[in-house]
Image (spheres, rainbow, N blue to C red):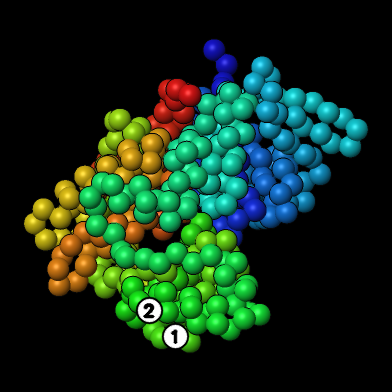
Amino acid sequence: MGKLNIAVIFGGQSSEHEISCISVQTIAKAINQDTYDITYIGITKKGNWLLVDSLEKIEDGSWVNSDTLAVLSPDAAKKEIIISKSDEVTTKKIDVIFPVLHGMYGEDGTIQGLFEMAAIPYVGCGVLASAVAMDKVYTKIIVDDLGIQQADYVLVRAKETEQAKEDSSVMEALVRRVEDKLDYPVFIKPSKAGSSKGVSKAHDKEELIKGLELAAQHDTKILVERNIVGREIECAVLGSADQAEASGVGEILAAAEFYDYDAKYTNAESKTVISPELPEGKTEEIRNAAKAIFSAVDGYGLSRVDFFLEKDTNQVIFNEINTLPGFTSISMYPMLWKAKGISIEELVEKQIQLAFKRKY
């Protein structure tokens, strides 16, 4: 029996493009090349789909200079990619897809819809779970029904901040709406942005206004949340909605005031702790909550679920779920499973096997 053809898609048009280009290197090195023939497809920030002929070109960034296009055909009868260079057009059959795409147009259900149209097995959550989990507001609506505590919030539309530029009374009304429900400080988050892009913390009215304007640059919906003072705890989930397995837990020790993009990826002072000491029963509470949330959004394959353990009260408070967590050297998802005895190679193979078991 010959090798299976796996398409590994990376890059993308989101603010997390660079993180994807790092994650894909970890995943590609973990794929068993005795079993799979890897086809790399890089999506540029402008949305061009390019055939990449080596991992080295991903590592040095030269893949963006590829002159060969490679797009996925939506034809379910074909199950192939279409490769074009100059006037020459060829095709290649694809058995399974491993998307290594974080954020918009990669983790939000859009490309998952294309995979399903093409009827090709793929790694990770489906259209619904991806779309819901990417949108923090709608995740909150679903989690509300689970009885799991989460931070109080106010929804603001980016359109309202645009109107406020022409009419100051609109911004005054937005500020009152937030202040009537929440005490300072508050967090302001784009509802669908990833890796904390566009996120800020406001301690007063002036910072709130600036935060709303910043978040509006990243999304049409803005989430203003009560500030939770406590420990940042994460849990990895593997499997399907009806058969989910949770890892142990890890703790984030952010170098900055909060775990923003720079704190996650560029500040060496940020630390992760695997299996931190928590009050009795809290690890299991977090693991059970992670599985419940994964199941509620109809998760599949993998997700990382993030919580706070609130200071003084020790209450577990849900923060967010990430359906395609990072696979960099400092990413919590693979580290949590490694602590449970599952190597990165085993973890990647488990994801591929789950892709083949997916039922539409």
> In the image, what residue type sits under mark 1?
Lys
Judging depth in this view, the residue of 208 and 39 nearest the camera is 208
Of the 4 image quadrants, the one containing the N terminus is top right
- Name the residue located 48 percent from the left edge and 75 percent from the top edge: 174
The three-letter amino acid code for the residue at tag 2 is Glu
Quadrant of res 137: bottom left
The residue to which callout 2 is attached is 179
Pick whichever of labels 1 and 2 is earlier in the sequence: 2
Gap in angstroms between the C-alphas marked 1 and 2: 9 Å
24 left or right, relative to 239: right
Q: Does residue 316 appear anywhere in the picture?
A: yes
Residue under the point 50% across and 45% down = 131
**Dot 1, crowdedness within 10 Å: few (<14), some or many (≥20)?**
some
Q: Does 183 sit left or right of 69 as displayed?
A: left
Which residue is pictured at 58% across the width and 23% down the height? 119
The numbered dot on residue 205 is: 1
Q: Which of marks 1 and 2 is in front?
A: 2
| Residue found farthest to the left | 280
* Pointers 1 and 2 in contact (C-beta within 8 Å): yes
How far across and down, in percent of the image, does residue 158 sit? 57, 67
- Work out whether 228 lies above or below 204: above
